C-alpha cells in the first residue's frame, strides 16, 4: 500500500516519517527455523498455506530411496514434519497453489549431474492437503517428458507454468487435461550464451512469481546467468501476451556465478520485488513510477535490516509472502562452501 500524496500531506510529520521508515526503509529479520546439520535439508521453495503453515520443497534428498519428502513447518512453534513423499523423485523444485480446494502442484524428478534432472523423470505432483491437516496425499502425477530442468512454478487456475532453466523457456502443464507442452522460449529466459558450458551459464530463467496489477496477470522472473529480473504478461489461460520485459539487471562487484546469482522471488503490494540472491543476501528491487529501479540489500553483507544480529543467510534460494502482506519468509539451502549445514527459514518484515 502506498500513501497518497494527499494523505501524506494530512499526516503529522512524525507519523508520516514513522510509517515511511517502517514500510520503506527498515526491515526486521528473525530466523524462525533451521534444519540441524544432522538432517541438512536444502530448502528449495516455500509455499504459505491458508492456515499460515509453510510447505517446504527440498532440492537434494539423500535417502537411499526415491521418495523425496515434502516438509511442513509451523512458523509459530518451529515444528517441522514430513506431510508426504513424492514417489520416483529425489529432488523437488517449484510449488504453487492450484485453484481446486486444497490442491498444490510440486515439480520434482530424479536429480542427475550438474543440477539437472535425468531426462524424462520430471513430474508435476498434485498434492492434496486440507486445513491444519497433518498429512497430505499425492492425488495425481503428471509426466513432463523431454525436459531436464523444471524450476520456479506458478499456477494460473489449474494450469502451471514452469521455468525450464536449461531450455530458456516456459513449460505449460494443464493439471486437468494432464498435458504438458512448451509454452514459449525467449532469449531473455536463456542462460548466458557466452558460457553455455558452465553449469551456471546454462541456468537461465529460475524463479517465477505471479502478480496481478490492475486486472492484468504478470509473471515476474529471474534469470540467474544474466542477473536479470523481468516480467511477461499472461492471460487467464496462462498464455503469454506481449513480450518479455527486463526490469532490472542486478549490479554487483562480483561477477555473476554460482556464488552470485538471482534465485526465487516475490513481488509485494507496492510492486517491489524481493529476490533470494545466492549465496548470502536478500535483495529488494524498488520500482519507481518513472520506470527506473533501485536495488537494496535487505539482509546480508551491507544489508539494511535490523534485528538480524547473528543471522547469516546460507545460500538463500526462496522467498514467500506472509499472509498479512507485512512480512516475507526467506528459505535457504544451508550450503556453506559446498557443505550442507541445514536450510533456514528467516522471517523479514517488509
Ligand atoms: C515409478 O516409476 C515407475 C517406472 O516409471 C512406475 O512403474 C511406477 O508406477 C512409479 N511409481 C509411482 C508410485 O508412481
Ligand atoms: C530427452 O528425451 C527426449 C526423448 O524422450 C529427447 O527428444 C530429448 O532430446 C532429450 N533431451 C535431452 C536434453 O537429452
Ligand atoms: C562460466 O560459468 C562457470 C560457472 O558455471 C564459471 O566458473 C566460469 O568462469 C564462466 N566462464 C565465463 C567465460 O563466464
Ligand atoms: C525516477 O524516480 C526516482 C524516485 O523519485 C528518482 O530518484 C530518479 O532520479 C528518477 N529517475 C529518472 C530518470 O527520472
Ligand atoms: C566442509 O566439510 C569438509 C568435510 O567435513 C571439511 O573438511 C571442511 O572444512 C568443511 N568446509 C567448511 C567451509 O566448513
Image: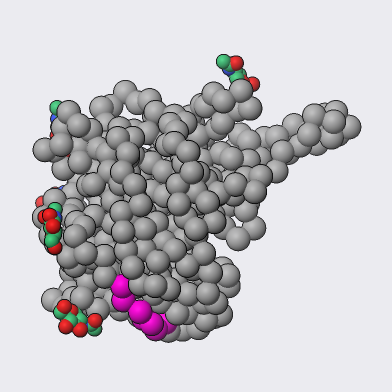
Q: Is residue 325 left or right of residue 255?
A: right
Residue ID at (23%, 55%): 149
Residue ID at (11%, 38%): 197
**Which residues fall within the magenta stretch?**
136-142
User: Is 296 in the magenta?
Assistant: no
Q: As displayed, is residue 135 above or below residue 179?
A: below
User: Is 141 in the magenta?
Assistant: yes
- Which sits in the foreground, 274 or 162? 162
- Which sits in the foreground, 57 or 304? 57
Q: Is residue 109 visible?
A: yes
Residue ID at (47%, 55%): 238
Residue 161, percent across and down? 39, 56
- Which sits in the foreground, 247 or 33? 247
Q: As displayed, is residue 271 above or below residue 114?
A: above
Q: As displayed, is residue 22 above or below residue 325?
A: above
Residue 110, percent across and down? 18, 66
Residue ID at (42%, 49%): 208
Quarter of the image where the C terminus is located: top right
Q: Is residue 34 visible?
A: no
Amino acid at each position: 500500500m502506498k500513501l497518497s500524496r494527499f494523505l501524506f500531506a494530512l499526516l503529522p510529520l512524525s507519523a508520516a516519517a514513522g510509517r515511511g521508515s517502517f514500510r520503506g526503509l527498515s526491515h526486521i529479520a528473525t530466523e524462525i527455523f533451521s534444519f540441524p546439520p544432522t538432517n541438512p535439508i536444502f530448502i528449495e521453495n516455500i509455499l504459505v498455506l491458508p492456515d499460515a503453515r509453510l510447505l517446504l520443497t527440498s532440492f537434494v534428498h539423500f535417502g537411499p530411496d526415491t521418495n523425496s519428502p515434502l516438509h511442513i513447518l509451523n512458523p509459530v512453534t518451529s515444528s517441522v514434519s514430513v506431510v508426504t513423499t513424492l514417489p520416483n523423485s529425489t529432488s523437488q523444485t517449484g510449488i504453487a497453489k492450484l485453484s481446486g480446494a486444497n490442491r498444490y502442484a510440486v515439480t520434482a524428478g530424479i536429480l542427475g549431474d550438474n543440477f539437472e534432472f535425468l531426462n524424462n523423470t520430471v513430474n508435476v505432483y498434485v498434492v492434496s492437503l486440507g486445513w491444519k491437516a497433518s498429512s497430505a496425499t499425492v492425488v495425481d502425477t503428471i509426466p513432463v517428458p523431454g525436459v531436464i530442468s523444471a524450476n520456479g512454478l506458478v499456477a494460473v487456475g489449474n494450469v502451471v507454468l514452469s521455468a525450464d532453466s536449461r531450455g530458456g523457456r516456459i513449460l505449460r502443464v494443464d493439471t486437468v487435461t494432464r498435458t504438458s507442452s512448451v509454452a514459449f522460449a525467449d532469449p531473455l529466459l536463456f542462460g548466458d550464451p557466452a558460457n553455455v558450458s558452465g553449469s551456471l551459464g546454462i541456468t537461465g530463467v529460475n524463479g517465477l512469481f505471479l502478480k496481478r496489477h490492475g486486472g492484468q496477470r504478470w509473471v515476474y522472473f529471474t534469470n540467474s546467468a544474466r542477473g536479470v529480473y523481468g516480467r511477461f504478461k499472461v492471460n487467464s489461460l496462462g498464455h503469454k501476451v506481449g513480450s518479455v520485459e527486463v526490469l532490472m539487471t542486478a549490479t554487483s562487484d562480483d561477477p555473476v556465478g554460482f556464488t552470485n546469482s538471482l534465485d526465487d522471488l516475490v513481488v509485494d503490494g507496492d510492486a517491489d520485488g524481493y529476490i533470494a540472491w545466492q549465496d548470502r543476501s536478500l535483495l529488494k528491487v524498488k520500482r519507481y513510477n518513472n520506470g527506473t529501479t533501485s536495488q537494496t540489500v535487505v539482509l546480508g553483507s551491507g544489508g539494511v535490516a535490523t534485528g538480524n544480529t547473528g543471522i547469516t543467510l546460507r545460500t538463500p534460494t526462496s522467498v514467500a509472502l506472509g499472509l498479512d502482506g507485512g512480512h516475507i519468509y526467506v528459505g535457504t539451502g544451508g550450503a556453506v562452501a559446498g557443505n550442507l549445514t541445514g536450510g533456514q527459514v528467516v522471517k523479514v518484515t517488509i
